[in-house]
Amino acid sequence: MTGLPKERLRVGFVGSGFIAHFHLKSMVGVRNVDVTGVYSRSAEKRRRFADAVAELGLGDCRTHESLEAILQAGDIDAIWILSPNYTRLDTMRIIHAEVKAGRSKVFAVACEKPLARTVSEAREMLRLAEDAGLNHGYLENQVFATPVLRGKEIIWRRAASATGRPYLARAAEEHSGPHEPWFWQGDKQGGGVLSDMMCHSVEVARHLLTAPGAPRGSLKVKAVNGTVANLKWTRPAYADQLKRRYGAEVDYRNRPSEDFARGTVALEDDEGNELMIEATTSWAYVGAGLRIQLELLGPEYAMEFNSLATGLKVFMSREVTGSEGEDLVEKQNAEQGLMPVLEDEAGVYGYTDENRHMVECFRNGETPLETFHDGLAVVEILMGLYRSAETGQTVNFPAPELEDYVPPVARGR
């Protein structure tokens, strides 16, 4: 990482789908960054992504036909891994090989949640990044969500300092189901809604319970208990709807992944205080759109946030007709009626501050707030919850048996 600090960070995107465009939109609010390259398997999606970069004024983005090509390009400093879960470890292996062989000048890598599908995969992601000497960041946007940043700062500065630390964090994230077929396939995604969304909930809750500036290790996971269920999408009419929408590979009559998950995580701080996380996620929520609910409770105070309790709302009568879209809120489920509007989804959900933080840390050679170490710790909790749901028993930590554990829905078909 010679030559730091860099005046501007030149970023290459691996992946050009939904989440890549979410990150791209957020980059408008980030200084000292240019998006200079993109690689994905689809030439058409690569072209559309590069066009979007130009429209947003974020740099001269070149498209690349292979991962090796974008890594060997002379105008890429850092890689954002935003491709599907089942591609991430292979992507990291190629990054490692190219950097170690001296064919790539990339010096930093950021990876979208979850870091991997299993503990052993996550540990390998971390090992490869560190063996290649790469600065690394774990892209958990909810930690950087504007209500989380502001709420945590107020609670710890005013309330916790006067009456004691918070002891219970609740986090829920729910919507009506993912965008892409692979999300619904347990072997490709690594699980169902627990893998897809509980990664957000347990990490943002852990973050809210951690004292500002304290290391992650200041909280120890003691035990986890999980429950999963199939509430909606295994019903015959909905299983058939998925097959029509995504093809025979998404077969929820015979190969479903869970669409509901609940988890409790017992922790202990460095003074021996008992702390709790309660997390709930589902793909079976049909409301205005994606709903994130957060609570933080302490001895004499409480904080709460609901992403759909917006200040801005619009009403459209049945006379207003149009095609389906997501122009008001992510996973929007209606185009008529009284609807909440998120004026700045990328900001509220945390993508803008997350990318601003990662860019500045990489540009200056500093360790980000969220690294692959955090991504690994999250996967350990997720696998503990899956194991608990499978056995019907609480899983106590440390839990070395989770190292090679694969959730039932992700096992070979």
Image (cartoon, rainbow, N blue to C red):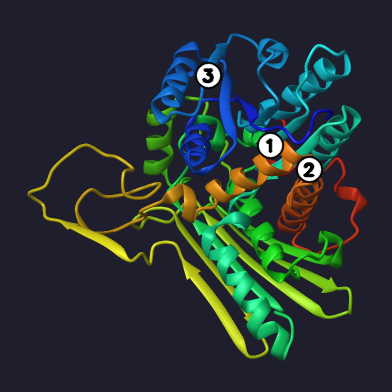
User: Spatial distance from mark 2 to mark 3, Cα to Cα?
Assistant: 27 Å
Which one is in front, 111 or 243? 111
| Residue at x 87% of width, y 27% of height | 132
Task: Tell me the number on the disc at residue 372.
Answer: 2
Q: Position of residue 130 (x, y in %)?
A: 88, 34
Amino acid at the residue labelled 2: Phe
Residue 205 visible? The answer is yes
Displayed quadrant of residue 187: top right
Q: Are marks 2 and 1 in contact (CB under 8 Å)?
A: yes
* Viewer-side label of 1, 3: 3
Q: What's the CA distance linking mark 1 and mark 3?
A: 20 Å
Question: Does residue 117 appear anywhere in the picture?
Answer: no
Q: Earlier in the sequence, mark 2 or mark 3?
A: 3
- How far apart are the two marked residues, 2 and 1, measured between alpha carbons? 8 Å
Q: Which numbered disc, 1 or 3, marks the residue that appears first in the sequence?
A: 3
State which quarter of the image contains the C terminus: top right
**Label 1 sits on residue:** 111
User: Residue 304: x percent and y percent?
Assistant: 52, 74
Q: Position of residue 215 (x, y in %)?
A: 83, 61
Q: Secondary structure at mark 1?
A: strand
Q: Is residue 248 left or right of residue 387?
A: left
The numbered mark at residue 61 is 3
Looking at the picture, which amino acid does disc 3 mark? Answer: Cys
